[in-house]
Image: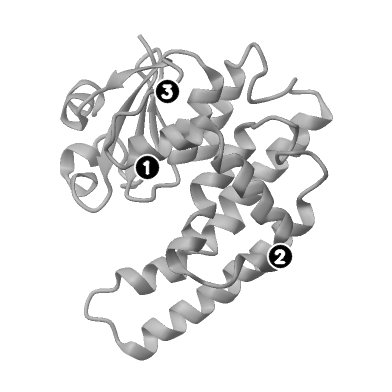
Amino acid sequence: MEPVLLYGFPSGSSMGLVACLEWLGKPYRLCRVDMFGEMREPFYKRLNPRVETPVLITDTGAVLTETMAIALWLSARDTERRISFDPLSPQADRMHQLMAFLNTGFTGAFSPVWAAMEMKDPDPAVRATLHDWGRESVLERHDRLEEMIGDTDYLVADHPTLADGVLIGVARWFDFHDLADKARWPKLAALRARIEATPAVAYATAIEAGETPSGTGACLGQIPLTEVAKRHGT
């Protein structure tokens, strides 16, 4: 069977993994998950008790969670090295370093901003404190990423890799929260523009929005969440 990626909407970081699957070009299926609705239901918790996306149902039917674990699963099956590198190469080391940074400190910096936005009956002072704390954390992490960007067209090479997919799924949160002027990070702004201009990211963004775009043909269709949970929930 083909692997099935469960991706979240709206604005799920898993959008970047959909783009990676398109870049990879091997058959896969998708399952669209409403993160503010059905993800909270018991049948989803049987798939991922941490109530998060993404989730990958592998080609053997195993349930795999966490972005880094899924990215490494894809890398191990990237025999043509379209989105990864020889595991012993310097490029692989740099890709893993960047993905680790993006999936920890860079992503985590947004947590207080999301918490402030999603508070129910918030104390205005608490909300403001969370937002300001999160904003400063996000700006600092963007400063560090700007320093890490090299001379290649994309994060690691002159073509998109897993690192670019991990970045683009999260980087757009900055625009959603309107935290500062992106001109502060010219290298990052140019990099994001190149990644977002790829057909794979355009496809992933349209899929997330509920549209039915034409991609590479690697995606063999979508499966309802209830069916995935019935088959693979434990």
Q: Which of marks 1 and 2 is nearer the N terminus?
A: 1
Identify the amino acid type marked 3: Gly
Q: Do the residues labelled 3 and 2 touch (CB within 8 Å)?
A: no
Lateral position of residue 210 relative to residue 86, left or right: left
Residue 64: quadrant of the picture: top left
Q: Residue at x 65, y 62 (%)?
A: 142
Q: Name the residue under label 3.
A: 215
Secondary structure of the residue carrying numbered label 3? loop
Identify the amino acid type marked 2: Asp
- Residue 24 x %, y %: 55, 20
Lateral position of residue 202 relative to residue 41, left or right: right
Q: In the displayed image of the protein, which residue is found farthest to the top? A: 1
- Residue 69 x %, y %: 53, 33
How packed mark 3 is, by other alpha carbons closer than 10 Å (few <14, some 14-19, many 20 or more), is some
Q: Which of marks 3 and 2 is nearer the N terminus?
A: 2
Lateral position of residue 94 relative to residue 101, left or right: right
Residue 217 appears in the rendering: yes
Q: Residue at x 32, y 39 (%)?
A: 48
Identify the amino acid type marked 1: Thr
Secondary structure of the residue carrying numbered label 2? helix
Residue 59: quadrant of the picture: top left
Considering depth in this image, is 63 or 85 the residue closer to the camera? 85
Quadrant where the C terminus sits is top left
Asked if residue 122 is positioned above or below residue 222 in the image, the reply reads below
Q: Earlier in the sequence, mark 3 or mark 1?
A: 1
Lateral position of residue 119 relative to residue 130, left or right: left
Numbered badge on residue 53: 1
Alpha-carbon span between mark 3 and mark 2: 34 Å
Alpha-carbon span between mark 3 and mark 1: 22 Å
Q: Mark 2 points at which residue?
A: 143
Residue 7 appears in the rendering: no
- Residue 141 x %, y %: 65, 63
